[in-house]
Amino acid sequence: MELKIHEAAELAGVSVRTLHYYDQIGLLPPGRTTQAGYRLYDDAAMERLQEILFYRELGFALGDIRLILSDPGYDRREALLRQHEMMCRKRERLDGLIDLLERTLRGERDMSFTQFDTKEMDAMKKEYAQEARSRWGGTQAYAEHEKKTAGYDKAKWNDVEEGMNALMAQFAALRGESPAGSAAQALVAQWQAYLSANFYTCTDELLAGLGQMYAADERFRQNIDAHGEGTAQFMADAIAAYCGK
């Protein structure tokens, strides 16, 4: 499935301007951009949008959402479980407020203010963002990522995305060959250099972690496999061979 930007915005209940802004700050790039400049949102992009909206519903700042989602150790299932826990806590708080309103409407005098207390939710959000910051936000890689991408405009993000897509297409073309072969290994070196040039210094350690996510994380896998089924696994295997040397 691919949706045009206005279709994606309508489906998600957000404005087109919001999606433009998410793209501009690198939070939610479209699945691909056509030669005519039209943004198209595939299943992976819409899944990421849904994750963003869960975080927004819970009151997370956009900066914290970008930090969490860009964490190399991000685990989507774990994130959904934590979001579920926080949503349940939010529901309990709302139930308390509704009960207080109903009792007030019945004429009961209750001067309780505990139902308005948000300290527990605020603490959970702070702890969640801090965990990502301690793993990723405090690293040199994240600082470099923020510094390099801070000045990226729409045209630059499109150029970076096109470059990544071109490299992924080359990986797709090598499927069926050995991921440890010279062609695949040379392509991994290009991929590592591209990440270093456009985002952060991609060490072998960081590259190895990314390779594991490409095949294991559904969001990454779907995006990469758009170039051909099995491309994500091929990239993961090639990166594993490259970093294992």
Image (spheres, rainbow, N blue to C red):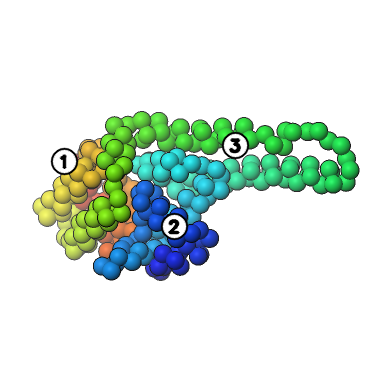
The local secondary structure at tag 2 comes to helix
The front one of 121 and 176 is: 121
Tag 2 residue: 17
The residue sitting at 27% across, 55% down in the picture is: 155
| Mark 2 neighbour class, 10 Å CA radius: few under 14, some 14 to 19, many 20 or more | few
Question: Where does the image place residue 120, in percent across and percent down from the top left?
Answer: 62, 33
Tag 1 residue: 245
**Residue kind at label 3, given as amino acid type:** Met
**Residue kind at label 2, given as amino acid type:** Arg
Q: Quadrant of the C terminus?
A: top left
| Mark 1 neighbour class, 10 Å CA radius: few under 14, some 14 to 19, many 20 or more | few
Query: Which numbered disc flags the more N-terminal residue, 3 or 2?
Result: 2
Asked if the residue under mark 2 is in contact with the one under mark 3, i.e. CB atoms within 8 Å, the reply is no
**165, above or below 242, in the image:** below
The residue sitting at 40% across, 40% down in the picture is: 67
The residue sitting at 21% across, 59% down in the picture is: 166
In this picture, residue 106 sits left or right of residue 159: right
Query: Which numbered disc flags the more N-terminal residue, 1 or 2?
Result: 2
Depth-wise, is mark 1 or mark 2 nearer the camera? 2
Q: Which mark is residue 191?
A: none
In this picture, residue 114 sits left or right of residue 183: right
Tag 3 residue: 121
The front one of 156 and 91 is: 156
**Residue kind at label 1, given as amino acid type:** Lys
The local secondary structure at tag 1 comes to loop
| Mark 3 neighbour class, 10 Å CA radius: few under 14, some 14 to 19, many 20 or more | some
Residue 52 can be seen in this image:
yes
Picture quadrant where residue 95 is located = top right
The local secondary structure at tag 3 comes to helix
Depth-wise, is mark 3 or mark 2 nearer the camera? 2
Question: Where does the image place residue 27, in percent across and percent down from the top left?
Answer: 39, 49
